[in-house]
Image: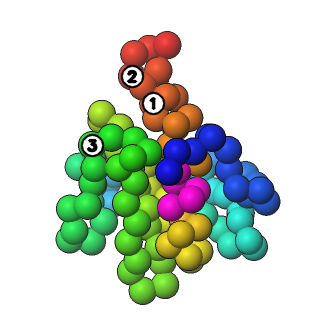
Amino acid sequence: MKSNGRLPIGATLVAAHSCIFNGQGFGHVILKYHNELVSILVTADGVQPSEQNIFGAGTEEMISGVGSGTYRLAHFATERYVVFVVSVLSEMENVEIARAIAPSVSMHIAQAEQGV
């Protein structure tokens, strides 16, 4: 399913910053959707959730979703980065947000890599 690049109605930006966790740098955007916080994390490829290697090497068509206890994780990869969407939302909603942001985030990362 293709995305029109828009967040679901009702999703709002809460904050954005960069941070380091366990020595790994992340770009971190926080959204609010259905009264729940959603973390969007961008980091260099090579970081894996849990022990599963579930990364694809594309954008929107390669979005995967998994659950781990309370949290749901959806992700997609660009050439050098991985983007994670983490929340307590349903797997379907989490993947919906990942699909919505994939085109613009992938384009932004590609432009930054080319120095545009």
Q: Nearer the viewer, residue 81 or 22?
A: 81
Residue 58 picture location, percent across and down? 33, 40
Residue 48 in percent (x, y) is at: 26, 60
Looking at the picture, how far across and down is residue 101, in whole percent? Answer: 56, 45
Amino acid on which the number 1 mark rests in the picture? Ile
In this view, the residue farthest toward the bottom is: 69
At a point 20% along the width and 71% down the height, the residue shown is 51
19 vs 35, left or right, is: left
Q: Is residue 68 above or below residue 33?
A: below
Quadrant of res 32:
bottom right
Which comes before the other along the chain, label 2 or label 3? 3
What range of the chain is rendered magenta?
95-99
Badge 1 or badge 3: first in the primary sequence: 3
- Prevailing secondary structure class for the magenta stretch in the rendered image: helix
Q: Hey, what amino acid is under mark 3?
A: Ala
Residue for badge 3: 57
Identified at 39% across, 80% down, the residue is 68
Q: On the image, numbered disc 2 is attached to which residue?
A: 113
Which residue is located at x 49 percent, y 13 percent?
116
Which residue in the protein does label 1 denote? 109
Q: Secondary structure at mark 1?
A: helix
* Amino acid marked by disc 2: Glu
